[in-house]
């Protein structure tokens, strides 16, 4: 059964992130108080349009696969079908951005395994929810720009060297991004955001697929949602609870999760 719900969306299927001012959002949580709290927080933002709230993961799957949804907030531990399992049943292409909101921190690995953009622990903090929405807006904008045109990338030519560059196929053309231009890469659902020395580029490749392709001598994964270029690392600082921070050239600071800290530390001391 559906929980508290707005009108069923009837948006076109082709691209969930057509240009519009608000993120069309679905909330899925089997607990009514949690749904209500999150809906109240999101409706207080002028950047979000809550189009439906669902008690059942199966109901959420149907609404999302109908198209026109930009962002999904989903609980993980639910009856019949977990939030992670529900995400794997999404057939809309590309999928909306997904944020998991849960009381269980031990599901983080599974959540980022399906390329969620964020993971929020309950009880929900409005400030933390707002940060997740702002991240979604930034990713949404960059993805939309990438869909319109890869104007900042150069098509490969016969003389272009592909040995030291990332190859991106799009609309029947091959684009190249030299490894030396890449500072770090950020997961964005079905896309990855490549932060370059000059600007950002969104490509329709998952972070896991890029990790398998990029040379390990030049790139290291430091978090489930980020890969860095080792040549752009200027400092590493240890934090509490086994985590650490990397400072990249230009002053960018990224968190290193416990799972990847030792790999980066070993490389930097070679």
Image (spheres, rainbow, N blue to C red):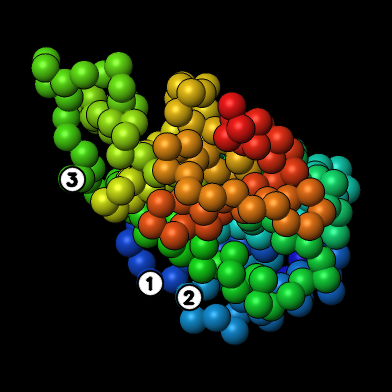
Quadrant of image for the C terminus: top right
Give the left or right position of residue 178, taking residue 114 as reference.
left
Say which of 19 and 269 sits in front.
269
Residue highlighted by disc 1:
21
Q: Which residue sits at x=44%, y=60%? A: 251
Residue highlighted by disc 2:
47
Say which of 173 and 27 sits in front.
173
Q: Are marks 1 and 3 in contact (CB under 8 Å)?
A: no
Say which of 55 and 117 sits in front.
117
Circle 1 — which element?
loop
Give the percent coordinates (x, y) of residue 206. Answer: 50, 34
Q: Which residue sits at x=16%, y=30%? A: 155
Give the percent coordinates (x, y) of residue 66. Answer: 53, 48
Say which of 236 and 8 sits in front.
236
For this orientation, the residue located farthest to the bottom is: 44
46 versus 264 height, above or below? below
Q: Earlier in the sequence, mark 2 or mark 3?
A: 2
159 versus 270 height, above or below? above
Q: Which residue sits at x=42%, y=37%? A: 231
Give the percent coordinates (x, y) of residue 81. Answer: 81, 42
Q: Which residue sits at x=17%, y=24%? A: 156
Give the percent coordinates (x, y) of residue 245. Answer: 62, 53
Circle 2 — which element?
loop
Residue highlighted by disc 3:
151
Q: Nearer the viewer, mark 2 or mark 3?
A: 3
Can residue 104 be seen in the rendering of this structure?
yes
Q: Earlier in the sequence, mark 1 or mark 3?
A: 1
Give the distance between the C-alpha atoms of the residues marked 1 and 3, in whole angstroms. 23 Å
Q: Are marks 2 and 1 in contact (CB under 8 Å)?
A: yes
> Which corner quadrant of the image does residue 73 belong to?
bottom right
Can residue 187 be seen in the rendering of this structure?
no
């Amino acid at each position: 059964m559906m929980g508290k719900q707005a009108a069923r969306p009837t948006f076109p299927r082709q691209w969930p992130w057509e240009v519009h001012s608000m993120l069309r959002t679905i909330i899925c949580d089997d607990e009514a108080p949690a749904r209500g709290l999150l809906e109240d927080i999101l409706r207080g933002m002028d950047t979000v349009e809550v189009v439906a709230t669902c008690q059942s993961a199966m109901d959420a799957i149907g609404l999302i696969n109908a198209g026109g949804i930009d962002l999904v907030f989903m609980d993980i531990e639910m009856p019949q079908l977990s939030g992670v399992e529900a995400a794997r049943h999404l057939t809309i292409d590309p999928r909306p951005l997904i944020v998991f909101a849960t009381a269980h921190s031990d599901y983080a690995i599974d959540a980022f395994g399906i390329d969620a953009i964020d993971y929020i622990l309950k009880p929900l903090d409005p400030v933390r929810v707002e940060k997740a929405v702002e991240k979604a807006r930034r990713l949404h904008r960059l993805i939309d720009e990438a869909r319109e045109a890869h104007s900042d990338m150069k098509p490969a030519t016969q003389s272009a060297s592909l040995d030291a560059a990332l190859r991106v196929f799009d609309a029947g053309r091959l684009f190249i991004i030299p490894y030396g231009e890449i500072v770090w890469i950020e997961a964005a659902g079905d896309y990855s955001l490549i932060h370059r020395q000059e600007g950002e580029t969104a490509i329709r490749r998952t972070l896991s697929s890029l990790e398998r392709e990029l040379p390990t001598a030049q790139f290291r994964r430091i978090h489930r949602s980020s890969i860095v270029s080792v040549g752009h690392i200027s400092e590493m600082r240890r934090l509490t609870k086994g985590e650490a921070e990397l400072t990249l050239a230009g002053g960018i600071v990224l968190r290193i999760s416990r799972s990847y800290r030792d790999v980066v530390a070993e490389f930097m001391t070679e």
